[in-house]
Image (cartoon, rainbow, N blue to C red):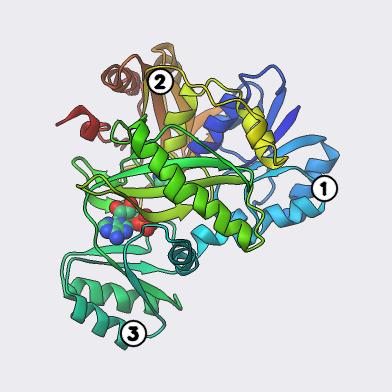
Amino acid sequence: MKVLVVGNGGREHALAWKLLQSQRIKQVIFIPGNGGTATTEGCQNFPIRVDDFEGIARFALVNGISLVVVGPELPLAAGITDYLQQENLMVFGPTQEGAQIESSKNWAKKLMQSAGIPTASFATFTEVEPAKAYVQEQGAPIVVKADGLAAGKGVTVAATVEEAQLAVESLFEKGFGTVIIEEYLTGQEVSVLALTDGLSIRTLLPAQDHKPIGEGDTGENTGGMGAYAPAPIVNQALMRRIEQDILQPVVEALRERDIDYRGVLYAGLMITPAGDPIVLEFNCRFGDPETQAILPLLETPLEDLLFACTKQQLSQLPPITWKPGAAACVVAASEGYPGAYQKGKIITGIEQAQAKTATVFCAGTRLVQQQLVTDGGRVLGVTATGDTLEEAIAQAYAAMDCIQFEGMYYRRDIGYRAMGN
Ligand code: AMP
Ligand code: GLY
């Protein structure tokens, strides 16, 4: 079988790596992919724009693609699944309506409210002055969110009323029509991803991302600088609560709205100091870098899960099985990220890193005359597994030591919350 993966990040590279472990998957074709995916055995890049749905459909039909897996949120929010399904293609990823759970925070909040899902209290505004007055009345800390896809830049956790009011002004100036102001929550964040066929769910191992650029979770937020799985804060009892009180009710609420949701339902959760899970956000896709840490532990063939979701047969599958132990992924970024950064820096040492029993998933990379060079903010992720998280982390850093490019930056404290320091 041939699988088409839409996207160009480490998440997509990890999906392909996992799929290719199965005898049944002969080839993974990326649209558009990156420098690393171009040189991975069994993989091929094809240069079609991600928003060219017609081109993608034609390509998939002509090339006998068995399944299309959509990585990022943008094409999902733009309706890639709706388009490809009309062409009778099998697609893993929700329709445009379903993707609103990520593309519109206001929509997601209302859905959570009506389904009784625990989430931060909030108010929605379409004008600056009432929003600022509300901030004044509530006081700080307080959280200001844009109601739309903002590539991780739409949320301000404001320590003061002034900062929150500036964030409100800035979002309206940038053209966001709706702004959400939300209660500030404390606790530990975790990502719980569920696969769903629109009827039932199967959760993946809980993972913890590291969003800020700096060690100790300081500085600006990024797409994610590293992850590990399983996150010990989510024990079995808490996982059952997350499934029963959050994920399954959301799937039911989507179905009540006649939304056919087949893909990943990703809950970004705050586990409060009292141990209660509260939803910060939902995403309509696999997390990145979480997926790079989760998939190396997956024993069940990934394609079985993806097909079961797209064919609405998830409940017929046996329970997902996992390798024991833990996995850690450390992301290497270009100097300056998440701000401005240079591209085109030569990357060396990937083979040596892989020889250290780690796997390198490429993201912002490009091939120039057969040489891999940097081409984005998050350049690559190094994932290692181990009997313990400590071992996985040590292996990932040992492998990362082999990799070099000018201005390479990575956090040295991935997993610190689980390691108790
Ligand atoms: P979101 O895109 O909604 O997940 O927000 C991005 C980040 O902002 C989250 O990962 C949290 O670190 C932080 N955040 C979002 N909402 C809240 C909240 N209500 N209280 C505290 N921090 C939040
Ligand atoms: N790692 C955060 C995300 O995928 O949204």
Is residue 412 visible to us here?
no
Amino acid type, callout 2? Gly
> Disc 2 vs disc 1: which is toward the camera?
1
Front residue of this view, candidates 71 and 373: 71
SS at mark 3?
Answer: helix
Could you say which quadrant of the image residue 154 lies in?
bottom left
Q: Residues within 10 Å of mark 1 (few under 14, many from 20)?
A: few
Residue shown at the point (45%, 25%) measured from the top left: 360
Q: Is residue 125 above or below residue 229?
A: below
Q: Which residue is mark 2?
A: 349
Secondary structure under tag 1 reads: loop
Mark 1 residue type: Asn
Disc 3 within 8 angstroms of ligand 1 (CB): no
Q: CA distance from mark 3 to mark 2?
A: 51 Å
Point out residue 231 in the picture as x, y percentages from the top left corner: 33, 32
**Can you identify the residue that label 1 sits on?**
88
Look at the numbered discs 2 and 1 and tell me whether their residues touch, using CB distance below 8 Å. Answer: no
Residue 396 position in % (x across, y down): 34, 22
- Circle 3 residue: 128
